[in-house]
Image (cartoon, rainbow, N blue to C red):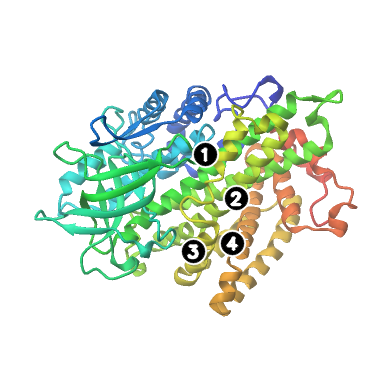
Amino acid sequence: MVDTPIDYSQYEEGRHVNYWALDPALRAEVERTYADAEFEWAEPELSDLGEVTGHTITDNAEIIDREGHELRTYDKHGEIQNHVQYHPLQHENDQLVYDRGVTHDIFHAPPGRDDPLGFQHVLTQQTILSFADGGFVCPVSMTTGAAIVLEKYVDDDHPNADLLDEYFQGLTSRDYDDHIEGAMFLTEKQGGSDVGANETTAEPTDEEGVYELHGEKWFCSNIDAEGTLALARRPDAPDGTAGLSLFLVPHTKRDGQLNDQLYRRLKDKLGTIAVPTGEVEFRGAEAYLVGEPENGFKLMAEMMNFERLTNATGSVGGMGRCLLESKVQAATRDAFGETIQEYPLMRRDLVNMQTDYEAALAFTFEATRHYADYMANEQRLDEAPEDRDDDAARAFKLMRLLVPIAKYKTARMAVDTASYACEVLGGNGYVNGFATERMLRDSQVLPIWEGTSNVLSLDVLRVLNREAAHEELFPLVEDCLDAAEHPHLDDLAGTVADEFESMQAAMLSLATEDQDYAQHEAKQLADYIFDVVTAALLIERAQDAIDERDDARKALVAEWFVETRFEKGDARGITDGEKLPDDHFAEIVQHGSLSPDQLADTAPADD
């Protein structure tokens, strides 16, 4: 670990560092999600991953982004070969990650343990990896997502259970030579987010559970994965999502021959070059039914929940990298006789970025905690609500509400953070070869992957209406606010409590309005929930830091979040004379500690 306050002037840029050791905010937030014994085992593993990510994987990512991969659809004789020629450094990155158990340790006991880790572990690992390359993390995430579906929905009496178990074992192997990757082919040209418009068909063969797929998938990331999950409609199945079944479609068939599909081309994307994304035509492709027929959309939603959450952790990792690049630049760039971090306006900008980052961390890892609880209860999305016990029901409702909000909000925040990081670096920030330029390109896909902002906001409405998720959300917020004991935090909690009441009124209003109006305001409501919940979480974490470490730094972060979200003030606060970002730059941005007694010298947001 590093000494605090952190002197960022000792670094030349935001790599060749240990991303885990250099980020106290990330470490503190992650530790909350683990059981004590699990964190004791996991912490050295996370530090090791932070080290290799900050050095080898990050360096490789820069080269892979510049040189890319190549799709060779046909061989020299004109025969289909569907071969992706990967950059050799991609294989090095893959081995570094998969041999460290990133897709293994949550399904099987890793070396030195008797039991697997909870899902918070892989989500933390993916956060660290996203400091280097969000495109690289995409196949890692989909591999885990595909394994989740196979483990949950392939029973021993399922047709081809043994075959599908072989794919599961490959997806979760800790040996790179035996490891295969997963993918999710969901989008079709005519449908987009309207999955029910799926036109891919599945024709049964003479072998039970084996089908031939015909149709087109338009946006296929990790195009040549051996463990691809895809939706298709069987003969006489109903229209819409209710008629879709889920299939595993391998790159190669059981006899070792290339499967009957055509990889037409790779997309010429703005970013995420590390993951090859293309268009696929199924031409009678061999496919194996997963789960119950016509239940495919719910099964794919199981994977989608995980992918949305990894989109959020990926956004957080990208924000952390951009923030680090900005801090190093501010500490080393001289202008008019001083480093730019000495100027009050840059200090305020960096405090804003740090606060956004810690807000995204708090909300995302709160969602991660409830997702991990949901997975630990071995729940399935197709289970009836009455079959869940109280703990399982609570985890399910919070997971279903917090995950889409986390994905929506952090994706937009990642774009904004990357954009401003380019500005902090000036002209260099916009030039290929500097990390901020690539992070901006990569981050722009985050609001698109796994559902756009509008789709996610509408999902929030559905969860509130169908699952009554507010019944578990309200006690969560109340418990966080009740934790505030320090007078400074108690004042902040009062401000948030008022907003909490207003948020509940907003929920009630949309529940009683017509559907068009509710949809019109859906994104506003999602924003409001994020702000209120995040403020409450930051206050709770601030009180914990005071109690456990006698450190009030987190209270400053909570205060600035509350003030910038809820306290407009007269003349937009310009006339109030407050300079918290300038006065406490070292504590907030450089992770310096602050005695709780010193909080008396900082005015609470409502004073």
- Whether residue 550 is visible here, answered yes or no, is no
Whether 35 is drawn above or below 460: the answer is above
Q: CA distance from mark 3 to mark 2?
A: 17 Å
In the picture shown, does residue 342 fall above or below 526? above
Q: Are marks 1 and 3 in contact (CB under 8 Å)?
A: no
Lower sequence index among marks 3 and 2: 2
Tell me the kind of residue under disc 2. Answer: Arg
Label 2 and label 1: CA atoms lie apart by 16 Å
Question: Disc 2 or disc 4, which is closer to the eye?
Answer: 2
Q: Are marks 2 and 4 in contact (CB under 8 Å)?
A: no
Residue 318 in view here: yes
Labels in figure, total: 4
Residue topped by disc 1: 271
Q: Nearer the viewer, mark 2 or mark 1?
A: 1
Say which quadrant the N terminus sits in.
top right
Query: Residue 371 at x, y = what percent?
Result: 44, 52
Q: Which residue is mark 4?
A: 526
Residue type (three-letter) at the residue carrying disc 1: Gly
Secondary structure found at label 3 = helix
Of labels 2 and 1, earlier in sequence is 1
Question: Up-down: is 175 above or below 228?
Answer: above
- Proximity of marks 2 and 1: CB atoms separated by less than 8 Å: no
Q: Quadrant of residue 553?
A: top right
